[in-house]
Image (cartoon, grey):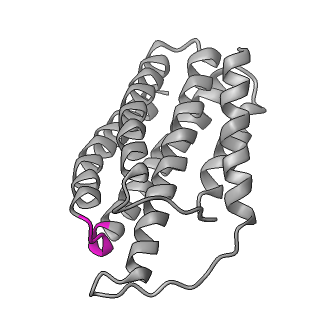
Amino acid sequence: MRAYGLTFAATMLAVAQMTGSAARAQVVTSSGGEVSGSMQKKIVDRMIVSDSVEIEMARLAQSQTKNPAVRDLAALLVSGHRAHLDTLRKLAASPDIGRVGDTESASDVRAFEQLRGMPADSTFDRAFVTAEVQLHQQAIDNLKKWRLVATTPALQQDIDRAIPLLEGHLTRAQAVAAKL
C-alpha cells in the first residue's frame, strides 16, 4: 500500500507540474519544424500521463473490487498500459522526440480522484468500468488525431500499435459493463 501511495504521489506531482506550465497555441508545420516537434513532445507526454493514470486506476480497482470480471479487466489494463508506458519512456528519452509537459491530461486524473473516494462495492465497479470505457474511447479518438500530425516514424509506429491495444481494452470494458 505504501508503494501505491508513493506511485500515486509521483504521478500527481507530475500532473501538477504540467498543469502549472503555460499553455501555448500550437501550429503544426508540414515541414516538420520546431512547432511540429513541440507537438510530438506533448503527444508523448499526454500518452505517458494517460498510461500512468490508467495503471493507478486499475491497481485501485484490483484492490477494491470483489467482482472477478472487474479484477480481470483491471489486471489486463495494468499489464497493457505498463508495457506501453515502458515504450513511451524510451520515446521520451529519444533526442528525436522527447517530452514536454501539457495541461490536457487533467480529465484522467479527475476520473481517478473520483474513484479513490468511492466505497468498495458494486457502485465502485460500475464507476470504474464506465470510466474505463469513456477514457479508452477518448484515448482512441485522440490517437487517431495525433497520428495525422505525428512526423517521427517511431511515434507513428507507437500510435499504430497503441490503437489496437486500446480498442481491445475498450471492447473488454464494454463487455464487463454489459454484465454489471
- Residue under the point 73% across and 41% down: 113
Left or right: residue 30 compared with residue 142: left
- Residue under the point 72% across and 41% down: 114
Q: In which quarter of the image is the N terminus?
A: top right
Query: Relative to 29, does residue 147 appear above or below in the rendering?
Result: above
Identify which residue, 113 or 21, lies in the foreground: 21
- Residue under the point 60% across and 50% down: 108
Residue found farthest to the right: 117
Residue 168 x %, y %: 28, 39
Q: Is residue 62 visible?
A: yes
Identify which residue, 112 or 17, lies in the foreground: 17
Residue 28 x %, y %: 39, 84
Residue 18 x %, y %: 67, 59
Left or right: residue 3 compared with residue 132: right
Left or right: residue 65 compared with residue 40: right
Query: Relative to 132, does residue 46 appear above or below in the rendering?
Result: below
Identify which residue, 174 or 95, lies in the foreground: 95
Q: Is residue 65 magenta?
A: no
The mark tally for this picture is 0
Q: Is residue 130 visible?
A: no
Residue found farthest to the front: 95
- Residue under the point 34% across and 33% down: 172
**Residue range highlighted in magenta:** 147-152
Residue 163 x %, y %: 28, 51
Left or right: residue 148 compared with residue 35: left
Residue 76: image quadrant is top left
Identify which residue, 124 or 17, lies in the foreground: 17
